[in-house]
Image (cartoon, grey):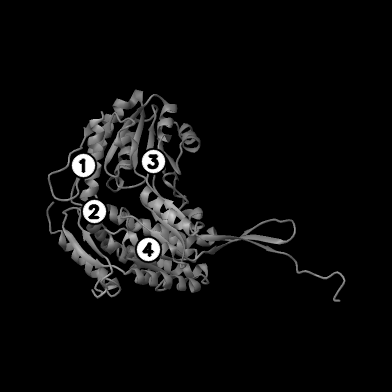
């Protein structure tokens, strides 16, 4: 891959430690019960820094400090909350190169995608600083006499359990509306991105939020239940796998606490006979290859009507072949490594088992002979039920082409999945596409002639095994508030006067 890969890491690490080193990284090893967190470079397999974690008691103390902070933070006005949120956007933009390099170091994201992720985070902070007051405005209710209204008031301290694949965006997507609503937050991030987890806490501190308004917990997954069950936590947000969602949801339900879950997806895109095939293939490849295919809302199943299936397969191979593997630190690289060798090996198992059961390999499908977690852009055709590429979520750069007889059959195949996060319709008839997207597809999001993506202005979330609840927009900020009914009746009087 060339170049000194350690140089950018050391520079970013020095800057990061300037902000958070005194908080966490060089703590005394006398805390023998604390876990440690080892970072690895997925591009080379080389070990990075080791971070000292929190003991279970430290994690509880931090959580309770965030709850104490809530008592003051909830009484601030929305303009008072918006000022540090706007400064958080400025911090993100100023340190974008550092944070993008940190993501590359810890989970292999290309620098180009990392910079785009940081800008999206900054724009999200700006959005909620600007619109939270409107989203949370009290709503009058006509009761035919007494004054009545609906008010939105903060709940308390919210626990976020977040994944590695968008290590800044997933957290900021949760944190910006949560803090603007008047809540405080604690973060349990994925264990392979400890530097990103600490950097996120540093962003909010540098922006001027109260010290305990947003805190990071460096704890293993086994320690999460005690945090959920502690009275300091009001609710939980999790983005992750279906098994993780089941576990966290059951733990939260066991203590009668709300949870919002954004889980896996096996997003289906319908490719209809009236579409421009090459244009559709370009959209499909972009949908499949976002973040190296490591995205819950990446397009994974491309359901193509029979009459254009062969032409689409050829066009998709051309479009996917443009995503060549390369050094994630180079600006022109379109496909970096996956997050770990273990994840790569699981994807290769899904590919080889699908081929063994009759799928046709049109592109890729071979593990490169090089260190690191590399896997090429891959296209499988002839995918049918019973194959992992059809039945499972493939969390990597593998596109599955499934043939359908016609529109109705394509809709049936798309909905025949336990997942329901995103979906797409590729068609030359916009009215047809809107009808299918609105009425037919069982998903939380359905886009016509564009790949599904999260946006601050649109509610984000899924149905079925893809989770419940919403993030972003007005629906998202209201997930973690007390939606309170208030009625004010005229003061009581005594008709006969005092006795």
Tell me the SS state at disc 2: loop
Q: Is residue 120 visible?
A: no
Mark 3–mark 1 distance (CA, rounded to whole Å): 24 Å
Residue 492, horizontal then vertical, whole percent:
78, 69
Of mark 4 and mark 1, the one earlier in the sequence is: 4
Mark closest to the chain's N terminus, 4 or 3: 4
| Residues marked 4 and 2 touching at CB (< 8 Å) | no
- Check disc 3: other Cα within 10 Å, few if <14, some if 14-19, many if 20+: some
The mark nearer the N terminus, 2 or 1, is 2
Q: Are marks 2 and 3 in contact (CB under 8 Å)?
A: no
Q: Nearer the viewer, mark 2 or mark 3?
A: 2
Tell me how far mark 4 sits from mark 1, CA to CA. Answer: 33 Å
Q: Residues within 10 Å of mark 4 (few under 14, many from 20)?
A: many
Calculate the distance from the C-alpha at mark 4 to the C-alpha at mark 2. 21 Å
Q: Position of residue 394 (x, y in %)?
A: 30, 42
Residue at left offset 24%, top offset 59%: 101
- 348 vs 253, nearest the viewer: 253
Q: Nearer the viewer, residue 208 or 242?
A: 242
Residue position marked by numbered label 4 in the rendering: 187
Which quadrant of the structure image shows residue 424?
top left
Helix or strand or loop: what does disc 1 sit on?
Answer: loop
Q: Which residue is mark 1?
A: 376
Mark 1: give few (<14), some (14-19) or many (20+) Cα within 10 Å.
Answer: many
Q: Which mark is residue 450?
A: 3
Element under disc 4: strand
Q: Is residue 233 above or below residue 343?
A: below
The residue that appears at 37% across and 49% down in the rendered structure is: 243
Query: CA–CA distance between discs 4 and 3?
Result: 32 Å
Q: Which residue is mark 2?
A: 108
Q: Bin the neighbour count of mark 2 within 10 Å (Cα to Cα): few under 14, some 14-19, many 20 and up.
A: many
| Disc nearest the viewer among 4 and 2 | 4
Choose between 370 and 169: the one closer to the eye.
Answer: 370
């Amino acid at each position: 891959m060339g170049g000194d890969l350690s140089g950018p890491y050391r520079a970013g690490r020095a800057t990061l430690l300037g902000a958070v080193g005194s908080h966490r990284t060089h703590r005394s090893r006398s805390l023998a019960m604390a876990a440690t967190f080892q970072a690895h470079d997925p591009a080379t397999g080389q070990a990075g820094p080791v971070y000292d974690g929190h003991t279970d008691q430290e994690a509880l103390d931090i959580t309770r400090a965030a709850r104490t902070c809530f008592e003051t933070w909830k009484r601030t006005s929305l303009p008072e909350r918006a000022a540090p949120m706007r400064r958080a956007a400025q911090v993100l933009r100023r340190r974008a190169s550092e944070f993008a390099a940190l993501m590359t170091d810890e989970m292999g994201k290309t620098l180009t995608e990392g910079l785009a992720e940081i800008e999206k985070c900054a724009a999200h902070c700006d959005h909620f600083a600007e619109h939270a007051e409107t989203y949370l405005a009290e709503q009058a209710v006509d009761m035919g006499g007494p004054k009545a209204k609906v008010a939105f008031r903060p709940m308390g301290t919210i626990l976020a359990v977040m994944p590695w694949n968008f290590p800044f965006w997933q957290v900021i997507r949760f944190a910006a509306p949560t803090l603007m609503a008047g809540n405080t937050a604690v973060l349990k991030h994925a264990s392979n991105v400890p530097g990103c987890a600490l950097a996120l806490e540093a962003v909010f501190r540098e922006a001027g939020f109260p010290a305990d308004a947003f805190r990071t917990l460096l704890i293993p997954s086994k320690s999460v239940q005690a945090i959920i069950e502690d009275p300091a936590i009001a609710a939980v947000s999790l983005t992750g796998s279906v098994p993780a969602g089941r576990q966290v949801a059951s733990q939260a339900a066991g203590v009668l606490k709300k949870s919002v879950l954004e889980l896996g997806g096996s997003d289906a895109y319908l490719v209809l006979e009236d579409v421009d095939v090459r244009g559709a293939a370009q959209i499909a490849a972009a949908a499949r290859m976002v973040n190296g295919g490591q995205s819950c809302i990446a397009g994974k199943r491309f359901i193509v009507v029979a009459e254009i299936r062969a032409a689409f397969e050829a066009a998709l191979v051309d479009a996917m072949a443009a995503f060549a593997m390369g050094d994630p630190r180079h600006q022109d690289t379109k496909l970096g490594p996956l997050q770990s060798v273990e994840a790569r090996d699981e994807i290769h198992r899904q590919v080889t088992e699908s081929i063994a059961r009759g799928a046709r390999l049109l592109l890729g499908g071979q593990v490169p002979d090089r260190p690191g977690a590399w896997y090429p852009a891959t296209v499988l055709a002839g995918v049918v039920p019973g194959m992992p590429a059809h039945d499972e979520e493939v969390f990597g750069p593998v596109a599955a082409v499934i043939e359908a007889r016609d529109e109705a059959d394509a809709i049936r195949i798309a909905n025949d999945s336990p997942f329901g996060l995103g979906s797409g319709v590729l068609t030359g008839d916009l009215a047809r596409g809107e009808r299918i997207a609105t009425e037919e597809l069982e998903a939380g999001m359905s886009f016509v002639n564009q790949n599904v993506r999260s946006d601050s202005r649109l509610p984000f979330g899924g149905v079925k095994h893809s989770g419940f609840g919403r993030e972003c927009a007005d629906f998202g900020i209201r997930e973690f508030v007390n939606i309170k009914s208030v009625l004010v009746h005229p003061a009581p009087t005594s008709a006969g006067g005092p006795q």
